[in-house]
Image (cartoon, grey):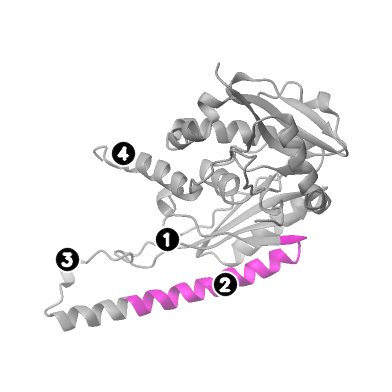
């Protein structure tokens, strides 16, 4: 083993470190919980031959490696989230040693406290809304039976198709927005994320909403039921509700 | 041909927290790379200079393209 670093998964407080004892760490390591004032930092030791800057550049491009790392990281966050409030770190947050980790916790003290206060007792729900594309070729492929006779013809057809499509999309957008408002009323906080690429999700159509909702843990069932009833009312939209998850989307430190 | 989705799919499984389907990789990376605590600075090795979103998209799309090359 070459040089090693300290991989930080999450920061929490007021939990029993013993409860994390059997949770697997990255690269077959052992999870440790470091106490620093009121904070508990969940860490493990990683080999910089695998997690150093150069190695990461290569490893992150390997899907198998990326998936394993992300799932292991996530399993740790979930285990912490089951016990108490969690401020999850981004994938591959690595310190050279515990001193530098502790210095960073000192720097983040105020922001970390805010994050932990905000997410305590709350979980994240994901709602994605997908509108079917009404016609084949909607994403720009041409219909061979309807070949334009001229360049001007082509432009006219293209313009009409684009307009029709954009009108359908804007109606779907509005319906999605109404659902978002209904669900937001049941959430403590919401975030609208970038729509996901269909090549990654495999969905057909246009993702008109990709939103995250921070919901009181006790109200998760009611939230999911509300989402289901919104979906029933809009049968031409696909409403994909997932959760509850650790509050990833609501644990950003206010710093750049 | 119209491809209207005939049914509404609601994947909401009512919890029991750990009794749910695992988080999809795309959702996980959306959050683990896109949000979460964002770090920068000298102490943290955390991927200095690497555009995480690019990395993710590149890795995933390359794989999916490889799948699509399979004969249908």
Q: Which residue is mark 3?
A: A144
Q: Which residue is mark 2?
A: A175
Foreground pick, A16 / A57: A57
What's the CA distance linking mark 2 and mark 1? 15 Å
> Badge 2 sits on which subunit?
A
Q: Which residue is mark 4?
A: B66
Residue found at the very far top of the displayed protein? A1
What's the CA distance linking mark 4 and mark 3? 27 Å
Left or right: A163 with respect to A217? Answer: left
Say if mark 2 contacts mark 1, CB within 8 Å: no
Checking the image for residue A205, the label placed there is 1
Q: Say if A85 sits above or below A182 in the image.
A: above
Q: Helix, strand, or loop for circle 4?
A: helix
Q: Helix, strand, or loop for circle 1?
A: loop
> Badge 3 sits on which subunit?
A
Say if mark 1 contacts mark 3, CB within 8 Å: no
What's the CA distance linking mark 4 and mark 1? 22 Å
Q: Say if A167 sits above or below B16 in the image.
A: below
> Badge 1 sits on which subunit?
A
Q: Mark 3 vs mark 2: same chain?
A: yes
Q: Give the magenta range.
A: A162-189
Which residue is pictured at 55% across the width and 49% down the height?
A: B30
What's the CA distance linking mark 2 and mark 4? 36 Å
Foreground pick, A210 / A228: A210
What's the CA distance linking mark 3 and mark 2? 33 Å
Is residue A187 at all visible to an observer of this figure?
Answer: no
Give the mark, 2 or 1, whose residue is nearer the N terminus: 2
Which residue is pictured at 49% across the width and 50% down the height?
A: B53
């Amino acid at each position: 083993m070459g040089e090693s670093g300290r991989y930080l998964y999450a920061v929490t407080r007021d939990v029993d470190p013993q409860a994390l004892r059997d949770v697997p760490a990255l690269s077959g390591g052992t999870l440790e919980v470091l106490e620093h004032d009121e904070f508990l930092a969940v860490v493990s030791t990683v080999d910089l031959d695998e997690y150093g800057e150069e190695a990461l550049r290569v490893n992150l491009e390997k899907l198998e490696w990326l998936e394993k790392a992300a799932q292991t990281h996530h399993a740790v966050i979930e285990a912490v989230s089951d016990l108490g409030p969690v401020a999850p770190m981004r994938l591959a947050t690595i310190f050279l040693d515990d001193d530098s980790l502790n210095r960073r916790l000192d720097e983040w003290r105020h922001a970390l406290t805010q994050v932990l206060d905000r997410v305590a007792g709350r979980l994240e729900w994901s709602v994605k809304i997908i509108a079917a594309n009404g016609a084949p070729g909607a994403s720009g492929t041409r219909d061979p039976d309807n070949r334009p006779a001229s360049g001007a013809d082509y432009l006219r057809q293209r313009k009409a198709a684009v307009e029709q499509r954009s009108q359908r999309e804007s109606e779907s957008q509005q319906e999605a927005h109404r659902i978002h408002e209904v669900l937001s009323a049941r959430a403590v906080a919401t975030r609208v994320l970038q729509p996901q690429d269909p090549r990654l999700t495999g969905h057909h159509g246009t993702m008109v909403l990709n939103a995250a909702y921070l919901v009181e843990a006790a109200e998760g069932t009611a939230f999911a039921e509300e989402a289901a009833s919104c979906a029933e009312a809009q049968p031409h939209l696909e409403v994909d509700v997932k959760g509850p998850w650790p509050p990833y989307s609501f644990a950003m430190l206010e710093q750049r | 041909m119209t491809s209207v989705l005939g049914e509404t799919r609601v994947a909401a499984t009512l919890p029991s927290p750990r009794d749910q389907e695992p988080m999809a990789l795309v959702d996980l990376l959306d959050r683990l790379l896109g949000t979460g605590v964002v770090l920068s600075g000298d102490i943290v090795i955390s991927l200095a200079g690497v555009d995480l979103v690019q990395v993710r998209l590149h890795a995933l799309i390359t794989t999916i393209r490889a799948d699509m090359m399979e004969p249908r």
